[in-house]
Amino acid sequence: MIHLDLLSGLTPPPAAFDLPPAIAVESSQVDWLYNMIYYVSIFFTVVITALMLYWVRKYRRQKTDKRMETPHYPRLEIAWTVIPCFFVVFLFHAGFKVFMTQAIAAQDALEIRVRGQKWFWSFKYPNGREENSHLYLPVNKQVKFLLSSSDVIHAFFVPGARAKKDCVPGMYTTLVFTPNVLGETPVYCAEYCGAPLGYPEPALEGAPHGGHSAMMAMIHVVPQDEFDKFIKEGPKRPEGLTDAEWGKQLYRQNACITCHSVDGAKGTGPTWKGMFGKPVELNAALSGGVGNVTADEEYVHESILKPQAKVVMGFNPVMPPYTLSDKQIDAIIAYMKTLE
Amino acid sequence: MTTEATADHDEHGEHGGDPEHPHADHPKWLQHHWDTPAQQFDAAKLGMWAFLGQELLFFSGLFVAYAIYRTWFGEAFAAGSHELNRTMGAANTCVLLFSSLTAALGVRSSQLGKKNETTIWIVLTIGCAFAFLVVKYFEYQAKFHHGLLPGTFFGTPRDMLTFEPLVGAHSPAAELPNHTNVFFSLYFIMTGLHALHVIIGIGIWIWILKRNLRGDFSKRYFTPVDITALYWHLVDLVWIYLFPMMYLIDYVPPGHRG
Amino acid sequence: MSDAHDHDHDHDHDEDGYGKDEVHAHIGSYKQYGAVFMALLAFTLLTVAVASVHLGNANLAVAVIIASLKAALVCTFFMHLKDDNKFNSLILIAAVTFIGVFFALTLNDVSYREKLDTQSGNRIYLESGDKAPGSWDNPIKKEEKKEGEAAPQASTSASAAPSASHAP
Amino acid sequence: MAAITTDQHGHGGHGDPNVDYLHVSKGIWSWIYTLDHKRIGILYLVSVITFFIVAGLAALLVRIELFTPGRTIVDPDTYNRLFTLHGVVMVFLFIIPAIPASLGNFVLPMMLGAKDVAFPRLNLLSYYIYLLGSCFAIYSLISGAVDTGWTFYTPYSTTTNGAVIAMVLGAFIAGFSSILTGVNFITTIHKLRAPGLTWSRLPLFLWAIYATSILQVLATPVLAITLLLLMLERTFGIGIFDPHKGGDPVLFQHFFWFYSHPAVYIMILPGMGIINELISTFSHRKIMGYRAVFISSLALALFSFLVWAHHMFTSGMSEYANMVFSALTFLVAIPSGVKVFNWTGTLYKASIWAASPMLYALAFLFQFCIGGLTGLFLGMLATDIHLHDTYFVVAHFHYVMVGSTVFAFWGGLHYWWPKITGKMYDEGTAKKVFWIVFVGYNGVFLPQFVLGSRGMPRRYYDYLPQFEFLHKVSTMFSWVLAVGLFWMLFMFIQSLRNGKKAPRNPWNSAGYEWGTPTPPPLENFTSPPTFTRGPYDYHLATDAEIAED
């Protein structure tokens, strides 16, 4: 597994003009178009500004201001109406052709389900395995992302692949590209999705703070064999970590940190400090009549998979359901036990 | 400037749509910055038509939403449409068409300077408008009692005036296909907004009636009556489209669509 | 297209000056207004009658055509567009055109949300019955929602994602 | 004109021709009940500038927060409310009414040779509706503003707390003021042209205002219905935009942008109109290709209705619609190009006096080139997918809105200041202020193009370390811009207090509005004018007309 030294040398200063380094096959065509319009714009702006400044200086108003009539150039008018039409139609055609390469997927593309949630990304591999904030992709294999969101509109933006698509609740959208460079590349959320109260740590290590700006994920493009090995075994405890330490890592990766504090501070959700094993007062109306319960393994297990089943008094039922494997939940419980 | 002028321009409520009705000294109704009455009349008509163009666009937003959701949830729209009472809808259409006729005849008699005849036509128009609202009230009451209400209220029968849920009343909402609540949301917004425009229309007609009885209008100056009739015809126009779209939906199963 | 022209009417007011001085629009006869009203009533009954006959797709088209005819009648006669300044009709036509554009381009998006994709054999909208998270949860059928909604993608409920209602 | 008694309301009577409109009636009531389009123009000007200052301060705070990655001065939630405040107040309460309602209201009747607008009371009513709308917006700001962004996208705007309904109601009501101003101006331009003012002699500023009024009348109602549906969605949960109840959030974006793209043309067209006046007056020449320029104004107004969904290329819209809207979007580039080429062509063999208003016009030309050409990047599907919702878009629309429209607004303000107040501002200071504002403005937004291309998303409270340097540069230049703007405000206030008395025609212009005495009497013209030449025909204008006297 590639060592997760994340953001230090992440994106070296941009090579082609000011576009981030390309990591997908389609990005080179987009870069070509970007550079082409870039030159055209520079040319026209410089020509018009130079002409303007030159004429302003050359035709300064003299004392003898013989105000003569502006001549009429019909042919010139027609010229600079018709010629841009051709140029513009070419631009449209080129743009649309390249756009379609990012919209239509081949039959055998690797299908990854991406779900945007308030302030972290979760990825689901074809074999049902689910990971948060980190996505492993085989190199040189076309990937078809099936995007959706469960609360507000987010946007899955991979600058390296020049790809972006909104994740809209209530419908699936797709995005297609073929990563061809090994290494890590960031994923941002490009559609505004608000911010939590206070200044909580983001789900991804080293990512910015602030909700919408904290909603970052990391794509790791790995060789095919490594990807196959990774995909087969489910999420297991990385070597050298005890259960509690793995639980602490999961606490970060799955953005539990956004709402549940570990130092007793008040947050959107109840704090985990000193919670495990103690009685918990429930909001009977929202918890199917149950008054209170002790916070044992079974309660934590159910609250992670079906959070709306039991709601603690004084908190809103806003926690989204998680699909973590039993081993992961046991690790989180181990971590909870250390929080006395 | 008489206080009459200042009272004039803020009685339309926040729409304030109708270009205000000119008041000036020589003759009384010609504003000082107009050269001739014809110029003032044309300007008022042009301004009013611009305002009507705006009203059309205002309702068009709702019709686009209607078109989209009908393409997606055809079956739900048809089921919802069958829940509506077609005879009441048709009656309302005829009432509004008749009120459009009386409004047009009111303008005609005002152009001929017949004050009393104009009064009769305006009173008839206001009467029809009230009749329309009464029919609408009973239609809404039926929906409330069946629980066919927009959005989150869909499915629980309620009393119309107190909003209290009616215990024991049966609501057909459960048997209706999915997404029918979208139909009833659109139904209540479109007909509700239309009814609001009818109420604004009644307000303006009553003000015109007051001015007519006071003898403001003559053969040479009938612009306010003409403009209010234009607004009223627009309200009727919107209902002409609303009636078939809401009440006369016929569902085509996807197979047929080919 | 200067429109400072005067009303070309045969009325007896004939003082000259900046255009026709006095305001005198065309005054229709009772008979004319009555006839228009009768036509409107006839169209209403027609549209109700047609609606009860099952014509499939044509029903919507016929309803819209009849409504547009009634609207045209009201505009030309009751709203005096026939004998009014031509610019007013231009405003109405402009408004109707922009409404048409609004309809056309929005429906162009909504009804083709997966058309383009079918040529390549896969669909943007999942036909496999998986509900997109955050999608339709039927407010009436409260009971079914409580125990059914375990994992977001788990339940394969009857209604597919809201906008995949067409069969291929 | 027979001596007509002045009237307490200053309008009923015809006002004494040699007493200017500011002194024809005194007291607060004469301002509150004024029906004089010039005073209403000033009322709009004052409110519009106050809102510009409020939103400008919010922008400064946003830039300071972005000075360093991580927390600089505010929490993420407050930052979101700050940039939303900046967006909503700038769009709905400053830039849409700025040129048409303030400068347009003041100058339009004078350019037409009319005594006043077609419906004076409707004009005043529009101002009070605008005030009512801004009261709701201010109430929303006070009670813990809104954090949805000025676009109010659902389902975020229907599920977040905060005074969304108050802000949305404010924008809803302010929209009606815009509609009624549009109705008023269309009727005035049609019906109140002085004899001899044919359509082909209409000043290009009026053509631009005419095109803008068409947009205001026909596009704003769709915003009204969208915001009404949003308010109903939040209160009764009607489910039009809520996916849980079968609604579709992308539909809200269609509705919103159907208005908001014509709205950006409501913002730019009046700016283009002012540029015609400035370039023609300070080059002492008729605008080159007058017919082409006014036709492209109307063409822009028409095309603006066809292209709205280029704001939604990545929103999950069907690829078929993406194709259609991208093709139509490129149509818009043609008229803008024609205008810029014609303005630049006018300078050829002209006799140019680079006074301070002209400097703003020349800066407009430079900045509108950048703004317009970066539009090509965003109209093209392939590059827009990468650049959408990044700082590239932020820089693009600030170049079009601030670099073009607001620069034109400042240019117009300098140009008509003597006509409005009867006093001259200090030309030396104005030039210094221009250069500070020019350098500050370009320094803020040029780096943001580069930030955007490198993938820095929009509306980010915190960012990765690699973007830090450019954000620092941008923030520092925003302070330079702020200094320039406050100095400009101070310069204008200074000119009010002790500026020299303005001559009748300080810029030696042949424009119709300079035919009236400065500041103009209540009825604009001592005697009803007839026009025998076009507004830009300097070769026909007599020396007396052009002279400063």
Image (tube, rainbow, N blue to C red):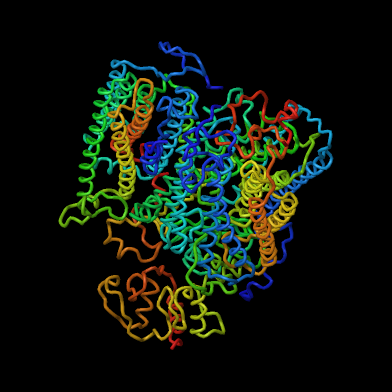
Residue in view at x 24 percent, y 29 percent: B124
Q: Residue A52, relative to residue D535: is it above or below?
A: below
Quarter of the N terminus of chain D within the rendering: top right
Residue D422 horizontal side relative to residue D321, left or right: right
The spot of residue A107 in percent (x, y) is 54, 52
Q: Residue D491: which quarter of the image?
A: bottom right
Q: Nearer the viewer, residue D477 or C25?
A: C25
Q: Residue lying furthest left in this view?
A: B168
Where is residue A330? Give x, y as percent. Answer: 43, 81
Give C126 or B164, whichever is nearer the viewer. Answer: B164
Along the line of sight, the residue nearer the viewer: A4 or B201: B201
As drawn, is C62 to the left or to the right of A63? Answer: left
Q: Residue at x 41, y 24 (%)?
A: B27
Q: Is residue C111 visible?
A: no
Considering depth in this image, is A275 or A95 the residue closer to the camera? A275
Tell me residue D392's x, y (percent): 64, 55
Against D20, is A42 above or below? below
User: Residue at left 47%, top 52%?
Assistant: D134
Coordinates of residue B201 in the picture (x, y in percent):
32, 36
Query: In the picture, which quadrant includes the C terminus of chain D?
Result: top right
Q: What is the count of numbered marks?
A: 0
Q: Is residue C102 visible?
A: yes
